[in-house]
Amino acid sequence: MANINVRGISDRTKEALRVRAAMAGMSLEAFARRELQKASMANGDEPTAFLDLAKKYFGVKGGVDLDTPQRSTHRKPIDFP
């Protein structure tokens, strides 16, 4: 699990959150975690997985077809005596 620190909130805000947490019968940490989780899902979108993004941009084929140039060398062969 990840951790975050929130700095710079006012004492008034912290106290309001502490009171709301107490009224809900929760610790401030648990209350803040729950509220952040609710806020992150408020628009109904689920977090997008990397593979879902790949399908969106590249299709279900799983990639793109590229024309690769023919390989060649510009070096002269070494002539051993």
Image: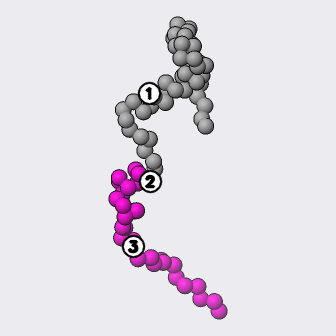
The range drawn in magenta is 52-81
Q: Which label sits in the foreground, 2 or 3?
A: 2
At label 1, counting other C-alpha atoms closer than 10 Å, the crowd grade (few under 14, some 14-19, many 20 or more) is: few
| Residue drawn at x 38%, y 55% as measured from the top left | 55
Secondary structure that dominates the magenta span: loop
Identify which residue, 41 or 21, lies in the foreground: 21
Residue carrying label 2: 51
Residue annotated with mark 3: 69
For mark 1, what is the residue?
39
Residue kind at label 1, given as amino acid type = Ala
- Of residue 17 and residue 13, the one placed in the foreground of this image is 17
Which numbered mark, 1 or 3, is in the foreground of this view?
1
Q: Which of pointers 1 and 2 lies earlier in the amino acid sequence? A: 1
Dot 3 alpha-carbon crowd within 10 angstroms: few under 14, some 14 to 19, many 20 or more: few
Q: Quadrant of residue 60?
A: bottom left
Identify the residue at image location x=39%, y=73%. Answer: 69
Judge whether 16 appears above or below 44 on screen: above
Q: Residue at x 37, y 35 (%)?
A: 44
Which residue is most to the bottom?
Answer: 81
Residue 23 seen by the camera: yes
Q: Secondary structure at mark 2?
A: helix
Q: Earlier in the sequence, mark 2 or mark 3?
A: 2
Secondary structure, mark 3, is: loop
Residue count near mark 2 (Cα–Cα under 10 Å), binned few <14, some 14–19, many ≥20: few
Q: Could you tell me the amino acid type at mark 3?
A: Pro
- CB contact under 8 Å: marks 1 and 3: no
Please state which of the two labelled residues, at mark 1 or mark 2, is closer to the viewer: 1
> Are the residues tagged 1 and 2 within 8 Å (C-beta)?
no
The image shows residue 49 at horizontal and vertical percentages of 45, 48
